[in-house]
Amino acid sequence: MNSYHVMVLAGGLSHEREVSLRSGSRLAQAMRDAGHDVTVRDADDSLLGWIDQNRPDVAVIALHGGRGENGAVQAILELAGVPFVGTEAHECRLAWDKATAKVLVSRAGYHTPRWVTLSHNSFRDLGAASLVSAVARHLMFPLLLKPHQGGSALGTAVVHEESELPAALVGSFAYGDVVLVEEYATGTEVAVTVVDGPDGPMALPAVEIVSPGEVFDYEARYTAGTTTYHAPARLSEDAAAAAAELALSAHRVLGLRDISRTDAIMTPDGRAQFLEVNVSPGLTETSLMPMAVAAAGQDLGELYTHLVERAIARAAAPAPTNVTAG
Amino acid sequence: MTGNSLDPYVAHYAVRTQGMRASAIRALFAVASRPEVVSLAGGMPYLQSLPLDALAAEASRLIAEDGTVALQYGSGQGIPALREQICQIMALEGISAHPDDVVVTVGSQMALDLVTRIFCDPGDVVLAEAPSYVGALSVFSAYQAQVVHVAMDDHGLQPEALAAAIASAQDAGRAIKFLYTIPNFHNPAGVTLSLERRGVIAEMCRSAGIAIIEDNPYGLLGFDDGVNRAIRADDPDNVIYLGSFSKTFAPGLRVGWALAPHAVREKLVLANEATTLNPPVFNQMMISAYLSGFDWKSQIKAYRQTYAVRRDAMLAALEAHMPGGATWTVPDGGFYVWLTLPEGFDTTAMLPRAVSERVAYVPGTAFYADGFGTRQMRLSFCYPTPERITEGVRRLGVVLEREMDVMRTFGTTLQPGTRHALGASAPAPDTA
């Protein structure tokens, strides 16, 4: 097996910095165990200079939230000519915006909870009371509110009646100016990781999440012992196949590359409801993607070695691309 | 099918660990440590003003000449030379103490832990100012003590509020173990307990049979160069005094102390030995060498001047950028300003917005054991330069503008108040 100089990007300035640092640390160890020379770098103002001086063979992005997932860092790596594992900049932007991803996946024929995306400006300019009432008339309670961009369930809340909406909206707007309000889907919550292989994208076993509250929130995600996970998920064969098909389709429809994680709800009638997709899945001790890798009988370091080799091979035959840094 | 909770010990933890959980708000402080963010959150002393080269030489000499002692196990009470020097420092505050009654600890945080351990059973009442030091609240929580907050004003703890709290707890048949107080340049409130009140409060506690834990890490950092007389100076039998080198020298060395009546001191030594065997000998010798070989009083004077300039920068910036109805304390020393926002603000909920704007603070609820402090925050002026403080408060002003915009949209009302939160006519930053 070849050994590469791998730059793991972790940290950043998003609200998920701490999670990213933990992801990066775990990924770096897995890559070192697989025999690679790993440098963990923050995405700061010394990054490009460091790249120029050290020319790593490849980058793996373990940044979560903000520039790590919205395509900005990917665009910068494309400009710097560093091969990287993961989705290209333009496609990142599609997946990063939850509403855009829901539109594209639903147009491909898949279910996703009904939703509306609203900015703070809309509430301010059109009148909060009337808009809140309109939302309440249009969607069925309970509702799930989340910032339209971002991860780790930060700023997420469940509301059961119209009177709870304003406070929940104020909470979500602290994380961003646009909130996605969708009908709360009940059923089995699963996460399905998709990995690109020689024969195309492949779904790893779904991981089932049994969290103590209505929302698989930050505390439930990162406090070991709080949430129970089943990997593989306790799904019927048909339901497992439906979950895998949804994740594979989301991966294809959104133009994702190398690795992605789709979050979904399997409803009691066996339908898969698409929630959102992640281009930079968490890699911490309590994250879902490493559980899926283990359930598939694979090793995280070996999996990323495979992805690193794909990225380097792509760089040998680069395709022209437009880049947009944000 | 049994799932995996990722923690095989989940059924075995002690009850007191129930609050030890991941927190999205705590995680945001990972961003606050980045240089792009103006952090008005942490209480880090400005160590750049220390004579680092000379200290490096001293550390080198210490190991070369006394390494077999400095790197060896030591006394559970701390090295005698440092305990004598600690008594000399406390003498500046009017305290007459014998080195035998000093117990050196791993920071004064450890001293507070040991004191709580030897006094508090689960359910015992600890009286503390409203608000109080977040690290103390964590210790009290770990020992399952119940914190009863006592109101402050611009002159510190209010004696009448203390009397009411004592009476209320006693009427309820609750055991009050001690009053925990930070009399000088309070963390987080920034205020100082007046000298008149010190005697009143000491007498009140003595009469009620309640010990006083006097936590005084900032006592030498008054901006007018004066040093307030400690409560312990006039009440040696009922006060356990906690001191620290973290604010006046270097927090990384983790050296603090407790001065206690002899019977308490004996138990503190035993508890200290059970926890750490002994406080780090090298660190104690390093501090001892610093106190004997360096002009540490001039260093403290330099700290005072630095912090006074930064305090002024923060107050000017607050005046320029805070919305009407916001109030804040005006500290005469120490590290902190306590900011109270108008009704409707929730400083915990708006912290993500602040981090997005590249400014950080500590939400007020961290300083209460009972959920109060929603519209308060602690701002530290000790570490950032005056220019950074000005920029940080400007960013905070932007955050508040946007927060008010959202509140206006959703109909949350703002109630204008008056400046200076702890003034006699204004509510204290607690239960008002």
Image (cartoon, rainbow, N blue to C red):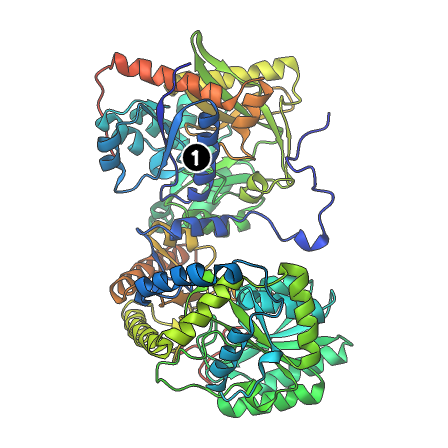
Q: Between residue B262 and residue A286, name the one nearer to us.
A: B262
What residue is at 67 percent from the left and 22 percent from the top? Answer: A234
Residue A5 placement, left or right of A222? left
- Image coordinates of residue A289 in percent, x first then y, are 52, 27
Residue A225 placement, left or right of B53? right
Q: Between residue A4 and residue B335, name the one nearer to us.
A: A4
Q: Between residue A50 and residue B296, name the one nearer to us.
A: B296
Amino acid residing under circle 1: Gly
Q: Return the residue found at the far top.
A: A199
Q: Crowding near pointer 1: few (<14 within 10 Å), some, many (20+)?
A: many
- Image coordinates of residue A161 in percent, x first then y, are 57, 46
Instruction: In the rendered view, tell whether residue A158 sits above or below residue B3.
Output: below
Q: Quadrant of the N terminus of chain A?
A: top left
- Image coordinates of residue A322 in percent, x first then y, are 21, 23
What residue is at 54 percent from the left and 29 percent from the top? Answer: A288
Instruction: In the rendered view, tell whether residue B292 sits above or below residue A310.
Output: below
Mark 1 secondary-structure assignment: helix
Can I make out residue A326 in this image?
no
Q: Quadrant of the C terminus of chain A?
A: top left
Can I make out residue B250 in this image?
yes
Q: Which residue is mark 1?
A: A24
